[in-house]
């Protein structure tokens, strides 16, 4: 089925929150998934796969131990921690590349590298186990296949690629991935009671007047 | 002639403007989205057609209304239904309506209409596509509908008093845009001149809906009365607007879109500051203002509400109108900075309702100072979402104090200050507000209490070194990312944050609804509870075939009938 990017974004935000991430990360994850879909990549699949890993139950183990030097965690790095940190600290790239180790769903780093590119107003390249992706914030080029998990990721200031991916205004997530996202999203919904139906919505008057 | 914009009077302080009670007293103005649309369509000489009107004697069928702009066309595809009274509900959880609509991007083919006929009547349960820009529905105002059909069928004109008091034949509820239920994303149309301003597709949809409703009521009267049916007098038809019934679902919007909402408020505040800075009002400007003031009072006399709070506000507004009249008679608008003096006088002499009415009204004589600000009201600043992690912690704390300083001394552990929680219901996936200590909703709370969250972040930040970049803090505390983002947004969006508690025991969500609806250009706010409001749109406006530059703007102020 064809979904608008707003629908993808709204579902991704609720799903990420439902999986246990903070609201701020959920906002960022949803914009990231939307950005991937706009590049014609399967953002819903990547997020569904990440959320299924359940890293949010132990977030501290899956984020870089410190901002300076090599970004490595106690366990595998979660892109919803490393990605926002990359975008927050884009200024680091002016001095030296950012190196990461053991990142799951590394595709989700790309939208955050795009934020960094916008902040720095330059091309940013992300090398993921030998596959190179380059972005200026709005556009993306990917040379090769992005792996499901990466041993080494290097983010640095880059140069404009020769060909760019075409932009997309719709997304076609696979039904299975969409279901996974909706199952996580469902955890954010309060069960309805008749009381809350009336109290919460505040209406209940007849419209026959 | 261009009037030079003076900037000697500053914009009003966000700490004053962004209080909920004031936001809940806002009135439409020159910058309202409905007026932007009708001005543009007249200026660009849009034409209108009705290629399809295939409706039977029971009022069931399909109609298409097309608006032809300079570069593109937009079509309202309308489905009329025969709805039994027990199905008629203005709740968003209704599942059947008197009429359902989609705004089609272009001119639909028969196949498009066929596809839409299988989906649009289902509303949320259907799917639309990238060629649709909005999805909406409306129910009849049963009393007025029957009165108008019966009168016309019997060869008489309907009673104007009844029309003034109800204001519309049909009332819309949700008008969904921006990618909802499969429709085109806002981004698809944001770069078109005619839809770059906010909500222009939705406003066009409602404008065309009003025409459809007029045609449908005539059709039904003709079906009932046959040869003896009268044709609705165009002068009476003018007073028929379109109603809208809006509930809580809309309230979080202004919290969830701080940059966008800032741009609306800031445009209006800039307009007010420019007019207050005018050194002297010309006789023509004074005359214009006085005329609009007179006309607006007639509209106010039609504003009815049974809600105690609004009854009180209307009483105050009526007293304010009298006070303004006396001020104009005594002090007048002669002398230096007349509008600034008027505004300063209003700050102690009038209620908030009256102050905001007046602040909107003084913009009327100054199209050249005001109307250009309309181009600043969209949100084109996606970069503001990205947190600047290099910002020192001391600066983040300063920003929080700037926007949420009022909240730092509030006891957020006290029950009355956090009595409410916003959540999304499982049933209809709509935002709701509940009682935190009486319902099991706290675990599902939505981030709609930015002030409370800012206070927590502010305290946590104080444990860190002032000079550290905030990126380090956020690495450890991702739970404060949304707060730091919002605090940084206030740099470019000073009017982006509500300066009141959105979860306190006494919060009135209605104020949030009204703030948004006033920018649409809504009038006659009629609260049905503290979180549900009926409004009127386009009452007094010309119909498409009558639209000219002369009547495209000031229709919101009715001319006194001769």
Image (spheres, coloured by chain):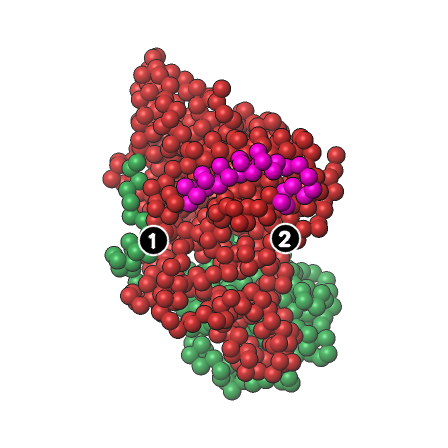
Q: Output the letter for the chain in red.
A: B
Marks counted in the figure total 2
Provide the letter of the chain coloured green: A
Q: Which residue is drawn at 50% across and 56% down?
A: B19
**Relative to the observer, which residue lies in front, A87 or A204?**
A204
Closer-to-camera residue (B123/B548)? B548
Residue B116 forms part of the magenta stretch: no
Between tags 1 and 2, which lies in front? Answer: 2
Q: Nearer the viewer, residue B143 or B514?
A: B514
Packing grade of label 1 (10 A; few <14, some 14-19, many >=20) is many
Residue at 43% in and 76% down? A54
Please tell me whether residue A119 is drawn above or below residue A198 in the rendered image: below
Residue at 37%, 40% in the rendered image: B305
User: Do the numbered discs 1 and 2 sit on residues whose CB atoms are within 8 Å?
Assistant: no
Span of residues in magenta: B313-341
Q: Is residue B295 above or below residue B316?
A: above
Q: Name the quadrant containing residue B336.
A: top right
Label annotation for residue A201: 1
| Residue identifier under label 2 | B11
Q: Mark 1 lies on which chain?
A: A
Pointer 2 indicates a residue of which chain? B
Q: Residue B69's quadrant in the figure?
A: top right
Whether labels 1 and 2 belong to a single chain: the reply is no
| C-alpha span from label 1 to label 2 | 36 Å
- Residue B28 percent coordinates (x, y): 52, 42
């Amino acid at each position: 089925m064809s979904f608008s990017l707003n629908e993808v974004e709204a579902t991704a935000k609720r799903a990420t929150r439902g999986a246990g991430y903070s609201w701020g990360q959920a906002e960022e994850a949803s914009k990231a998934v939307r950005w991937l879909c706009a590049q014609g990549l399967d953002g819903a699949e990547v997020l569904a796969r990440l959320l299924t890993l359940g890293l949010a139950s132990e977030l501290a183990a899956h984020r870089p131990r410190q901002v300076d030097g090599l970004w490595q965690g106690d366990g595998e790095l979660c892109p919803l921690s490393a990605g926002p940190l990359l975008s927050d600290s884009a200024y680091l790239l002016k001095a030296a590349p950012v190196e990461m180790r053991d990142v799951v769903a590394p595709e989700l780093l790309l939208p955050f590298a795009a934020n960094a590119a916008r902040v720095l107003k330059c091309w940013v390249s992300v090398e993921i186990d030998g596959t190179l992706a380059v972005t200026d914030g709005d556009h993306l080029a990917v040379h090769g296949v992005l792996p499901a998990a990466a041993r080494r990721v290097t983010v640095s200031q880059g140069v404009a690629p020769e060909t760019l991916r075409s932009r997309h205004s719709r997304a076609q997530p696979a039904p299975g991935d969409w279901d996974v996202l909706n199952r996580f999203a469902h955890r954010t919904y309060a069960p309805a009671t008749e009381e809350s139906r009336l109290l919460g919505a505040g209406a209940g008057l007849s419209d026959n007047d | 002639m261009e009037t030079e914009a003076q900037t000697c009077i500053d914009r009003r302080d966000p700490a004053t403007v962004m209080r909920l009670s004031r936001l809940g007293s806002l009135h439409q103005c020159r910058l309202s989205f409905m007026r932007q649309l009708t001005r543009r369509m007249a200026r660009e000489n849009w034409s209108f057609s009705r290629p399809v009107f295939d409706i039977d004697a029971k009022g069931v069928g399909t109609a298409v209304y097309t608006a032809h702009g300079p570069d593109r066309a937009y079509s309202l595809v309308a489905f009329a239904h025969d709805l039994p009274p027990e199905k008629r509900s203005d709740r968003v959880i209704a599942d059947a309506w008197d009429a359902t609509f989609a705004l089609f991007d272009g001119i639909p083919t028969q196949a498009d209409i066929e596809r839409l006929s299988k989906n649009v009547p289902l509303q949320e349960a259907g799917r639309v596509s990238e060629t649709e820009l909005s999805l909406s529905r409306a129910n009849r105002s049963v009393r007025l509908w029957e009165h108008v059909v019966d009168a016309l069928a019997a060869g008489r004109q309907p009673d104007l008093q009844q029309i003034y008091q109800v204001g519309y034949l049909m009332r819309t509820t949700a008008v969904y845009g921006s990618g909802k239920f499969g429709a085109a994303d806002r981004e698809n149309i944001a770069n078109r001149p005619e839809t770059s301003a906010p909500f222009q597709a939705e406003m066009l949809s409602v404008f065309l809906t009003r025409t459809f409703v007029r045609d449908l009521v005539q059709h039904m009267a003709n079906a009932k009365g046959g040869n003896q049916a009268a044709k609705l007098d165009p002068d009476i038809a003018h007073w028929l607007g379109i109603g809208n019934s809006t509930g809580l679902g809309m309230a979080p919007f202004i919290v969830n879109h701080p940059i966008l909402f800032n741009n609306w408020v800031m445009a209006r505040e800039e307009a007010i500051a420019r007019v207050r800075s005018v050194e002297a009002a010309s006789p023509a400007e004074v005359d214009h203002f006085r005329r609009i003031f007179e006309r607006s009072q007639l509209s106010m006399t039609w504003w009815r509400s049974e809600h105690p709070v609004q009854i009180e506000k209307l009483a105050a507004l009526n007293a304010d109108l009298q006070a303004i009249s006396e001020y104009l008679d005594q002090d007048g608008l002669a002398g230096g900075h007349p509008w600034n003096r008027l505004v300063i006088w209003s700050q102690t002499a009038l209620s908030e309702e009256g102050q905001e009415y007046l602040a909107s009204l003084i913009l009327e004589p100054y199209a050249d100072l005001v109307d250009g600000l309309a181009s600043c009201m969209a949100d084109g600043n996606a970069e503001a979402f990205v947190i600047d992690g290099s910002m020192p912690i001391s600066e983040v704390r300063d920003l929080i104090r700037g926007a949420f300083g009022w909240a730092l001394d509030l006891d957020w552990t006290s029950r009355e200050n956090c009595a409410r929680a916003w959540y999304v219901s499982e049933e209809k996936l709509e935002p709701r507000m509940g009682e935190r200590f009486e319902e099991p909703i706290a675990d599902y709370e939505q981030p709609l209490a930015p002030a409370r969250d800012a206070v927590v972040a502010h305290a946590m930040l104080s444990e860190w070194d002032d000079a550290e970049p905030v990126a380090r803090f956020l690495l450890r505390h991702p739970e404060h990312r949304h707060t730091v983002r919002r605090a940084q947004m206030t740099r470019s969006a000073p009017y982006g944050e509500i300066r009141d508690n959105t979860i306190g025991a006494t919060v009135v969500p209605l104020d949030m609804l009204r703030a948004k609806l006033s920018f649409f250009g809504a009038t006659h706010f009629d609260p049905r509870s503290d979180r549900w409001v009926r409004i009127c749109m386009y009452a007094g406006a010309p119909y498409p075939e009558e639209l000219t530059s002369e009547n495209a703007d000031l229709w919101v102020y009715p001319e006194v009938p001769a």
